[in-house]
């Protein structure tokens, strides 16, 4: 709870700094604030349990446990990387800098609600805090038609998904008489499979979450929104937001819907299989880097759905590890891609042509990030897939795990398209400018990917 309060306070400080015309200090203050919040979050590890605020027991709304503390830590680190890159990304939009950064801080607040909710009302509030903020950021480039299209598409389809979610919550409340996950779980275990209202409500809620994580067949918004949004916003959606939605999805399925596992597991198996197949196959023909990573994200959503299916063996640690490695690899890739896009004026894969000759160190960082996304050892992406697949096999999902392995092999091809462009094509003589902060973020992400690939126990042992 303290972590959430301090993060919200940081957002208010950002607004105050705009009033005081202290925009130049925004990024340093936010990074310092996130460092303090990370420490506060670590202190919550020993205090996990019911949330007490102003003398009131808030455990029916929020629950601080090892799950929420671990995921919050990963999200705070991801947010710090994004804010570090924002300093240069918004250098030409200083008059809107505090607006953009404050919105991202509040997105982090919503993500923290999603990791720690114990009530469907709080879950809905967390989703809407994140979603409404993203609608604004996706369409924030007012004079860019692609940004306008991305914002409008995301708003219309996201609003429809929120309506489906709200209707599903209404049916769950009508059947169980409660918004609390503990009471919903009790009802699901006793009467869930015999209650059509409860089953329909759970199906609607699951479908809404599948939209939020861009799983097939609710994925159509993702490539267009990723391509049209400002590149830093795309990075935000692909990393911090996606992992927070998966954390919320896992909490819902493990703490609320465990009693109707036969009803949901069949649906999720079909969706996971379709998501892995569509994501990887369609990514093969992409020439736009952001669309390629959008379909890559869809494929990774299919892999992370295996953790949602593997509740019998408590797959939370595998989901945490996979989410962390996916964030590091994706942010590491965008830390190289954003300066390339800015220098070349292109967002296609051929923008990276000849980068291995012009900037060998930077090209090496992008190569390692792509290899981690592809699941090549000894990088952490390999172990992320290994842990997820192992959990699925232990839960009896052998066939879909085999499919996941096959689609992962297919996925290696489109990641190597980027690598081959850097090392085998000549490219133009355009000078690529890499700001220091982008280089620092890329180096840290790659270093952590290597470290977790060699020593995964530090993260896997948390849950």
Image (cartoon, rainbow, N blue to C red):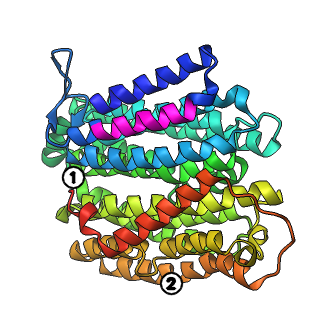
Q: Relative to 39, does residue 329 appear above or below in the rendering?
A: below
Direction from residue 210 to residue 350 in the image, left or right: right
- How crowded pointer 2 is (Cα within 10 Å; few <14, some 14-19, many 20+) is rated as some
- How crowded pointer 1 is (Cα within 10 Å; few <14, some 14-19, many 20+) is rated as many
Residue 302 placement: quadrant = bottom left
**Is 38 a magenta residue?**
yes
Residue at 78%, 33% in the rendered image: 142
Direction from residue 129 to residue 39 in the image, left or right: left
Give the SS element for disc 2.
Answer: helix
Q: Which residues are magenta?
A: 26-39
Q: Gap between marks 2 and 1, in whole Å?
A: 32 Å
Instruction: Report the residue that reaches farthest toward the right.
Output: 429
**Is 331 a magenta residue?**
no
Residue at 29%, 69% in the rendered image: 456
| Residue hosting label 1 | 258
| Mark in front: 2 vs 1 | 2
Q: Position of residue 133 (x, y in %)?
A: 56, 33
Q: Position of residue 398 (x, y in %)?
A: 30, 80
Residue 319 placement: quadrant = bottom left
| Residue hosting label 2 | 409
Residue at 69%, 28% in the rendered image: 96
Q: Relative to 463, does residue 14 appear above or below in the rendering?
A: above
Q: Observer-nearest residue: 159 or 449?
A: 449
Q: Position of residue 120 (x, y in %)?
A: 31, 33
The C terminus lies in quadrant: bottom left
Q: Observer-nearest residue: 227 or 99?
A: 99
Q: Observer-nearest residue: 91 or 196?
A: 91
* Magenta residues, dominant SS class: helix
Can residue 301 be seen? no
């Amino acid at each position: 709870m303290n972590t959430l309060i301090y993060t919200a306070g940081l957002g208010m400080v950002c607004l105050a700094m705009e009033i005081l015309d202290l925009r130049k200090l925004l990024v340093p203050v936010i990074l310092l604030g996130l460092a303090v919040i990370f420490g506060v979050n670590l202190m919550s590890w020993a205090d996990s349990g019911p949330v007490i605020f102003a003398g009131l027991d808030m455990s029916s709304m929020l629950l601080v446990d090892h799950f929420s503390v671990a995921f919050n830590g990963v999200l705070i680190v991801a947010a710090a990387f994004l804010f570090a890159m924002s300093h240069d990304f918004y250098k030409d939009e200083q008059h809107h800098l505090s607006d953009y950064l404050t919105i991202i801080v509040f997105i982090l607040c919503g993500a923290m609600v999603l990791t720690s909710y114990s009530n469907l009302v709080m879950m809905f509030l967390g989703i809407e805090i994140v979603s409404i903020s993203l609608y604004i950021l996706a369409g924030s480039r007012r004079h860019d038609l692609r940004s306008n299209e991305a914002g409008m598409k995301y708003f219309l389809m996201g609003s429809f998904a929120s309506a489906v979610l709200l209707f599903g919550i209404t049916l769950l409340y009508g059947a169980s008489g409660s918004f609390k996950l503990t009471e919903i779980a009790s009802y699901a275990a006793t009467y869930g499979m015999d209650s059509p209202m409860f089953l329909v409500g759970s199906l609607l809620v699951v479908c809404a979450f599948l939209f939020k994580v861009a799983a097939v067949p609710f994925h159509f918004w993702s490539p267009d929104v990723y391509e049209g949004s400002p590149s830093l916003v795309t990075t935000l959606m692909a990393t911090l937001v996606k992992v927070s939605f998966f954390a919320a999805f896992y909490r819902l399925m493990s703490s609320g819907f465990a009693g109707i596992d036969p009803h949901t597991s069949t649906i999720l198996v079909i969706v996971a299989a379709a998501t892995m197949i569509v994501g990887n196959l369609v990514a093969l023909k992409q020439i736009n880097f952001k669309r390629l990573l959008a379909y890559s994200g869809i494929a990774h959503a299919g892999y992370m759905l295996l953790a949602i299916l593997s509740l019998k063996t408590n797959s939370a640690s595998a989901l945490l590890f996979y989410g962390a490695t996916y964030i590091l690899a994706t942010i590491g890739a965008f830390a190289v891609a954003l300066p390339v896009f800015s220098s070349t004026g292109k967002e296609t894969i051929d923008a990276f042509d000849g980068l291995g000759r012009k900037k060998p160190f930077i090209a090496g960082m992008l190569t390692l990030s792509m290899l981690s996304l592809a699941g090549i050892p000894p990088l952490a992406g390999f172990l992320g897939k290994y842990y997820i697949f192992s959990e699925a096999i232990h839960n009896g999902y052998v066939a879909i795990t085999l499919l996941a392995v096959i689609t992962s092999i297919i996925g290696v091809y489109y990641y190597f398209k980027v690598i081959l462009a850097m090392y085998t094509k000549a490219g133009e003589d355009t000078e690529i400018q890499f700001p220091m902060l982008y280089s620092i973020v890329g180096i840290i992400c790659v270093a952590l990917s290597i470290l977790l690939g060699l020593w995964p126990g530090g993260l896997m042992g948390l849950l």
